[in-house]
Image (cartoon, rainbow, N blue to C red):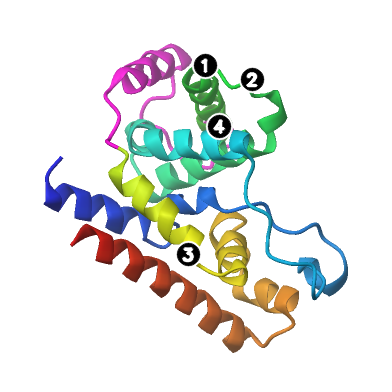
Amino acid sequence: MNAGRRAADVQLYLNFRPQALFFLPNPAPAGNNGGMPPTGTGPVQPPSSRQEAVMSELLRIRERATAFAYAVLRNFHAAEDAFQEAALVVVRRLDDYSGAGFEPWFWTILRNVLGSRIRAGRHAAVLADPAILERLAGAAAAAPASPPEDVDRIAACLQRLDAKARLVLHWRFLEEAGCDEIARRLGRSIQGAYALIKRSRQALRECVQAQTR
């Protein structure tokens, strides 16, 4: 994998909805202070080993999964949304994951997500036949995965951010919460929340880019 391709992959991860943010810990439970941990409770807890394993797998197969979704939907943003939805299903069903056979489990979830979107009429699919979807998913699953260098860099950089920055990025890019909602949770103005999101994204971007030079 050449330097140009690695740089392009990093830029994809750092786009509007960076898939690297799946490494972030779960947000605090909803409650007082709009879901923020009470003052003095310490930093956000890191993800468990099972969470880390699953998030690493999601990052490893992101390109193949998104390409598969794009082949079906013929729309890049719709493909990214479908991957995001499937990844959220995985995160919510972590208790069902035994630690083995992740890819067959994920590809089934992604096929179901695509099928649901097609049936709901949310996207005009090019390949809507379930048998074709299954064969295409099998071919995508068999494709070689990208090397994990960029994923490792992003994961390391995320760990260098402070707890609030990680939490805000989690809300924005994993939960897809709007700036108004994040502002409410933080007890800040919308402008203040936007500024914090921007600073956190920039810190992550600069850290990763520094490691690719």
Nearest to N terminus: mark 3 or mark 4: 4
Q: Amino acid at mark 3?
A: Arg
Instruction: Find residue 164 and report its horizontal and vertical position in percent.
Output: 62, 71
Q: Which residue is mark 3?
A: 160
The residue at which mark 4 appears reads as: 113
59 drawn magenta: no
Quick check: 106 above or below 157?
A: above
Where does residue 102 sit, x and y in percent of width and height? 52, 22
Nearest-to-viewer mark from 4 and 1: 1
Query: Residue 192, located in which quarter of the rendered image?
Result: bottom right
Extreme-right residue of the structure: 32
**Mark 1, secondary structure of its residue:** loop
Q: Report the Cα–Cα distance between label 3 and label 1.
A: 31 Å
Quarter of the N terminus within the rendering: top left
Q: Nearer the viewer, mark 3 or mark 4?
A: 3
Up-down: is 139 above or below 92? above
Going from N to C along the chain, the mark reached first, 3 or 1, is 1
Residue at coordinates 46% horizontally, 79% vertically from top-left? 199
Circles 1 and 2: CB distance less than 8 Å?
A: yes
**Numbered disc 4: secondary structure:** helix
> Disc 3 and disc 2: Cα gap in Å?
30 Å
Residue under the point 60% across and 37% down: 49
Q: Given the image, on which type of amino acid does mark 2 rest?
A: Ser
Up-down relation of residue 133 to residue 145 (above or below): above
Mark 2 crowd level (few <14, some 14–19, many ≥20, 10 Å Cα): few
Q: Nearer the viewer, residue 62 or 139?
A: 62
Position of 160 with respect to 172 (left or right) is: left
Q: Is residue 213 left or right of residue 107?
A: left
What element does badge 3 sit on? helix
The part of the chain drawn in magenta is 118-147
Is there any visible trace of residue 121 in the rendered image? no
Residue 123: say if magenta: yes
